[in-house]
Image (cartoon, grey):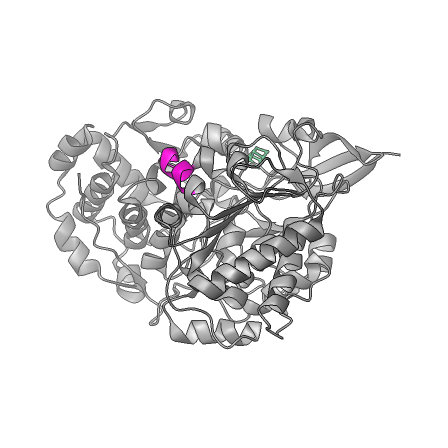
Amino acid sequence: MIKETKSTCCYCGVGCGVIISSQNDKIIDIKGDPNHPANFGRLCTKGSTLHLTAKLDNRLLYPEMRLTREATRKRVSWDDSLNYLTEQFAQTIEKHGPDSVAFYISGQLLTEDYYVFNKLAKGLIGTNNVDTNSRLCMSSAVAGYKATLGSDAPPACYEDIDATECLFITGSNTAFAHPIIFRRIEDAKAKNPNLKIVVVDPRRTDTAQMADLHLTILPGTDVALYNGMLHVMLWEGLLDMAFINAHTNGFDALKDTVREYTPKMVADICGIKEADIITAAKWFGKGPSLSMYCMGLNQSIHGTDKNAALINLHLATGQIGKLGAGPFSLTGQPNAMGGREVGGMANLLSAHRDLANPEHRAEVAKLWGVESVPATPGKTAIEMFDAVKEGSIKAIWIACTNPAHSMPDVNNVITALQNAELVVVQDAYNNIDTNQYADVLLPASTWGEKEGTVTNTERRITRVNPAIPTPAEARHDWAIMVDFAQRLEKRLAKNSNLFPYITTEEIFNEHRETTRGRDLDITGLSYDLLNEQGPQQWPFKAGDTTGAARLYTDGVFQKPDGKAQFVNALYKG
Ligand code: SF4
């Protein structure tokens, strides 16, 4: 008999819903979920061929271990591998302190996996050395949102694509990277020929081919362009002064800054025509304007300024919190959002709390039932491998990511892994580049087998259900960490019982409680509700019957006085 299971595509942050067909514990086909609001049944080439990846070729099926670097790894039992790791981690922590160990994890993990890693590092061991490959992807977007709006929350949603009159795509080749969103853009343009599409990209991409205006700026000149557009908006009377006065701070300083960003000066910096800057500013200023942006803004040494300068345009024109308007960062990874929600990074805490805030640290400690969570920020991705290389981090645990292939400056990462005293790699596959540096290799489950939740670009949480069981001795990422954490808790003589979970639902429910009263409050959600009513956007508070499609509709932002902050971003070459 063929079984159908609802899940999501695991490739990108669009978060398309899928229905997996399986027979005799084998995945045989896939189709788009017609009821999922991210894709309404559509899948791109990547998603529609996912079932072809569900093979046992190259799967890691048993734990392996070696006691010296010269030795070859041998198959061992779960008990032997986890007991060994417990002892090694305990000894390292006792001898060199909690910051001598680190966890490098992944935006490909599910939210429940992420939650356990984060609690293990910050709650049990007492280190903030937990960071993720999302650091390479979305950290500028996070910082840009926090600096301007006060919280790491994309305010718009996919529905806004259908309602916008000016779509401003910048630093994103949406046609390639987020194909299902692009299909929706094509539909919107077909329905509304007056829709203006502006694409800002030095490259002539497929996305740029459908633009009404393509601004081929010189690489890295984004801030100059946005400031130049603001200059034009000021001159042309396109600003929403009532919104600026009622809902923002810092406009006067920014006004002084953009005074000098004349179309002539910006045209020279960006290598585009003055007239095109004026046209883009006029279309954006008229609105409703939706901006969509991705790695072109994020992967930059000025990434936060680029994000903030773009958000400035929305605040100055009041193009936020309305149908068809808002700054909408496109998430690269399938569950970078979930990782951000549980605070699974070196400088974040659960439920969008700040590590630097003593009250937030006390709240998390209370929720977890521990004395405190550490105040010193942990090492971020790049710093983490630098610290492994120079020896202050002795043991590193890598899960669901392949840093020996995907990090910048790979040679540095490889030297670090060669220098480490202990490298643990937890992965579904036996052929990833990082495996060769592993002293202990732990087999994990993968797409089609995993259970939990993910959050997509538009803050929508979807249940991920397992279509088939895990093969051989592979285990779920959360389950591996819970088993290890329980052993370590005992070995470190802590009677805390911080990891009592038997199911992912128990982990979800604990995560849910940490969000109570926060901007991403999901106290109204449960596995049952997600199963019965389908994917939901946050916030979704207890008592609510639906999530919030878009944020800041009341003009109240997540800053102490409720006002958004203009960031005085300067163009730097
Ligand atoms: Fe998967 Fe992204 Fe394609 Fe959707 S758009 S099917 S989530 S790769």
Measured along the vertical axis of the image, is residue 494 above or below residue 533? below
In-image side of 559 versus 521 (left or right)? left
Q: Residue 334 or 86: which is nearer the viewer? A: 86
Q: Residue 351 or 570: which is nearer the viewer? A: 351
Return the residue found at the far right.
1
In-image side of 64 versus 226 (left or right)? right
Q: Position of residue 282 (x, y in %)?
A: 27, 40
Where on the image, by quarter, is ligand 1?
top right
The quarter of the displayed image where residue 358 is located? bottom left
Q: Is residue 109 magenta?
A: no
**Residue 104 visible somewhere in the drawing:** yes
**Residue 452 visible somewhere in the drawing:** no
* x 34%, y 48%: residue: 390
* x 30%, y 50%: residue: 308
The quarter of the displayed image where residue 72 is located? top right
Which corner quadrant holds the N terminus?
A: top right
* x 72%, y 47%: residue: 77
In-image side of 273 versus 549 (left or right)? left
Q: Position of residue 424 (x, y in %)?
A: 55, 46
Q: Residue 81 or 304: which is nearer the viewer? A: 81
Q: Residue 243 or 227: which is nearer the viewer? A: 227
Q: Position of residue 269 (x, y in %)?
A: 16, 33
In-image side of 1 versus 532 (left or right)? right
Q: Which residues are magenta?
A: 407-416
- Magenta span: helix, strand or loop, mainly? helix
Q: Position of residue 468 (x, y in %)?
A: 77, 40
